[in-house]
Image (cartoon, helix red, strand yellow):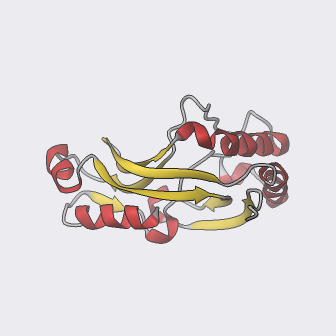
Amino acid sequence: MCDAAIEAQTALRSFPGLHMTPSEWLHITTLMAGPTEAITREQMSAMVSAARARLREIPPIPVFIEKVIYHAEAISLRVEPAKALTPILEAVRSATRTIIGPAVARDRTPSSWIPHVTVAYSTADQPAGPLISALGVVMPRREALIDTVTLVVQWGPERQWDWEPVGTACCAATTS
């Protein structure tokens, strides 16, 4: 999926007013657990452990990217089928709620969650037409297996990319 995002960024690189997501931080956001300062390191470790316990019951999920999503604030690649990723969303939500409670987590329901990889954020008003002409609305299809979730702490504003990975939880191992 990263190669699709980098291909999209290459097509958009000549446009001013776009902030590209650094390649090392390309991701699909699953759940915003809450403000960094509201969650202790112990809770973060417990959330990772709880997510590991839940995700080990879920096999890796095949997905694909091909549709480009244009929004006033960003350009993204849609990850499909969204419903296939619901078990991961539910596992992460359950782990988070178990540790920090439902009041802190900024929740997404499966029906409102649109899994995507943001390739660029808008930093200026500009017409969409030239962007769409450069990138299009469909890219060559790329397939991937989603098999890992990483808890990341975001220090400061999003576009500073001062992120700290805390731990990962993997889906069930596949056997041949």
Nearer to us in this view, 70 or 162: 70
Nearer to us in this view, 30 or 81: 81
When the figure is inspected, residue 67 is found, relative to residue 147, above or below; the finding is above
* Among the 4 quarters of the image, the one containing residue 162: bottom right
Question: Does residue 157 appear anywhere in the picture?
Answer: no
* Among the 4 quarters of the image, the one containing residue 175: bottom right
Q: Position of residue 34 (x, y in %)?
A: 67, 45
What quarter of the picture does the C terminus occupy? Answer: bottom right
Q: Position of residue 131 (x, y in %)?
A: 20, 51
Total number of numbered discs in the rendering: 0
Q: Position of residue 154 (x, y in %)?
A: 59, 59
Residue drawn at x 46%, y 61% is: 1
Q: In the figure, is residue 70 to the left or right of 153? A: left
Residue drawn at x 80%, y 37% is: 101
Nearer to us in this view, 99 or 53: 53
Farthest residue, direction top = 111
* Among the 4 quarters of the image, the one containing residue 42: bottom right
When the figure is inspected, residue 12 is found, relative to residue 125, above or below; the finding is below
Q: In the figure, is residue 62 to the left or right of 137? A: right
Nearer to us in this view, 3 or 73: 3
Residue drawn at x 41%, y 63% is: 21
Q: In the figure, is residue 49 to the left or right of 14? A: right
Residue drawn at x 34%, y 60% is: 19
Question: Does residue 145 appear anywhere in the picture?
Answer: yes
Q: In the figure, is residue 167 to the left or right of 28? A: right
Farthest residue, direction front = 176
Farthest residue, direction bottom = 24
